[in-house]
Image (spheres, rainbow, N blue to C red):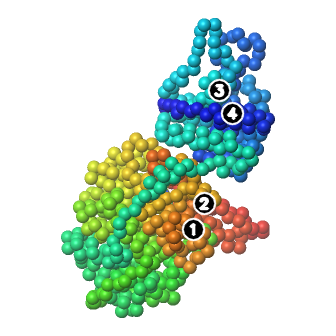
Amino acid sequence: TGDGDTAWLRVPSGTADALRALAQREGSTLFTVLLSAWAVLLHQLSGQRDIVIGTPVRGRNLPELESVMGFFVNALPLRLQLDPAQGFRSLLQATRSEMIDAIGCQDVPFEHLVRVLSASVEGVRRDTSRFPIYQAFFSYQDARQRPCRWGDLAHANVPVFQPAAAQDVALWFLDGADGLVGGLNYNTDILFAETAQLLVERYLAMLAALAKQLHDVPLRTLLSVTAAETERLTAWNDTASPLPADGSLSGYLDNAIARHGERALLRHGDTAITHAELSTQADRIATSLQDRGIAQGAIVGLHLQRSPAMLAAMLGVLRAGAAYLPLDPGFPAERLKFMVEDADAALVIDDSDHMLDLASCRRLALGVALAADAKPLQPLECSDDALAYLIYTSGSTGKPKGVRVPQRAVINFLESMRRSPGLDATSRLAAVTTLSFDIAVLELLLPLAVGAELILVDRDEASDGVALRSLLERHQVDTMQATPSTWRLLLESGWRGGPQWKALCGGEALPVDLAEALLPRVGALWNMYGPTETTVWSTCVQIRPGQGDIVVGRPIANTQVHVLDDEGTPVPIGVAGELVIAGAGVTLGYHQRDDLTDEKFIVDPVTPGARMYRTGDLGRWRSDGQLQHLGRLDQQIKLRGYRIETGEIESVLARHPDVAQAVVVAAARSSEDAILAAYIVPRAGAG
Ligand code: AMP
């Protein structure tokens, strides 16, 4: 809509005078200084280096027009290039020459320009909800020479409330007897009032800094976090929450099973067992593992079909003091073998139907383990770096990399999720995700931790919307976590949900249209965000109707999210930067990849000895304390929930003797249907 509002501003007279002096020194004008500063602010907020700003011209260049009544004002789009390393003075010069060029063409009607550019080869895309060519505006009127008195008639400037906005953001100034005053007129569909206020404050702070500036400082130094902002950022990251003293995951789960185990059910197909029965199976598996010499610190692969025994094996491995390595039998055998070898797995638990062909590693048949007599297990001391699982994720250099996830991080995660989004003993959760995707940890372990009913869904059912819908209805499921593609599949099946439903969506960006389709069908919709390297989810938020942009929320318990620039310095609220995650969820890095670990897990300046993880995600804090995810800074993509480094595929393709170069991209066949596409340059002489 064209709904708008204005945040008023006044430049203190000392600053205005200093800026006039700066303009004069540089052979420029106050107009150019204010406009350049506006461009710097837009550049900093958007990360864009190519910025178009519209500015009005009078359109009365001919003497004949002076006495003609009418509106002759024309709009000039100014295209400015900005580089964070560039100095402000050099930007001033560039703005000045751009302005001179544009003034030379001021008679070209803006409407004509829109028509011509829309029809040109590259074509300015028309979007009827936006102003064409530019969405930011700037105007400055020098009214200092205007008469303020006509005989006995006095006039004064009265700011008129404008409840509308023609552009997304328009900054205007009137330089007159009242000083240098202005306003930021903004579209209220796009900006909150507090954001507009923040922008005005930041702009004024920048003008104050420029007024003091004697040297040509780089644009990036004009951006700084104010003390008040630091206070707000600290408050948003204040997520301290107590944790159980014992850091052992199996101890934590055992306690919960002791409380709820006789009552809470685990269903699979037509069978149901209690959590206590599951626990007995886990004891047998743990005993079998200990009998085979599996001790604390060992890695045990789980090459298992989805069944209650898969979950028992997870628990059994933890009870034996080892960590599990998920090996989804649906994954290519070669990839699974690589993981087993790279992880130095001590043993793989296999179902007999789907044996992995392994030379390097011992094997334990699931049936054999389940048939063993359970011996009483000694409670284990759990060190701070004891692993819960080692999980592989795509690696840009051609090989997957193993993320080492400690037990204490998983406990923190489960404790946080138990409270929010929240799960309790009355919930019925359907688990649809492969164990090889870390979000399965929530689906499988959280119900055990709270005594909820767990309905284990087979892979075939999870990938068939109609089958999934009927399963959910049959078991009166009220909670499910899934990627956007699974939620779409379910919606297409005609699933109706209900007010008792809690829908958790994560793993990739939640599209607005999907949120809108889900909201009327559920009691609560949650957006979950986080990388494997910081233990499943690091932020979450309940999405409510009519909120506009989708956010990823706030940090979960004992977690901090920082938005940093490429120098590692925090950027102000509203400014985009890399999301860097600190706190209890940060894992121990990549298995036997110290170089990569040091690159991605950087020193946490706040907590001695701790690290924080550079996600490679672009994001920003909104002024309401919500984090927004804005895409990737690298070539990592998500396809139907799978995390893929396109570099991994490119480097495999490049190994082919006939391939000189390869590039892999996610190509959209439609908004619903993306594919991976590889482009190659054949080697000269290749057939
Ligand atoms: P993974 O390690 O497979 O969980 O993938 C983590 C990456 O998935 C993140 O770094 C994001 O790029 C993306 N991601 C996960 N959840 C979300 C979300 N809710 N919104 C946007 N991106 C997401």
Q: Nearer the viewer, residue 3 or 89?
A: 89
Q: Nearer the viewer, mark 2 or mark 4?
A: 4
Q: Give amino acid for label 2.
A: Gly
Q: What residue sits 30% from the left and 70% below the top?
A: 448
Residue carrying label 2:
568
Q: Is residue 408 visible in this depiction of the protein?
A: yes
Q: Is mark 4 within 8 Å of ligand 1?
A: no
Residue 488 in percent (x, y) is at 41, 53
Q: Nearer the viewer, residue 487 or 458?
A: 487
In the current view of this chain or complex, which residue is farthest to the top?
A: 151
**Label 2 residue SS:** loop
* Image mark for residue 505: none
Separation (CA) of disc 2 from disc 4: 35 Å
Q: Give amino acid for label 4.
A: Asp
Residue carrying label 1:
602
Residues at marks 4 and 3 touching, judged by CB atoms closer than 8 Å: no
Residue 308 in percent (x, y) is at 31, 74
**Does residue 595 appear to the left or right of 467 in the view shown?**
right
Q: What residue sits 68% from the left and 72% below the top?
A: 656
Q: Which of disc 4 and disc 2 is earlier in sequence?
A: 4
Residue 631 in percent (x, y) is at 55, 54
Residue carrying label 3:
175
Residue carrying label 4:
17
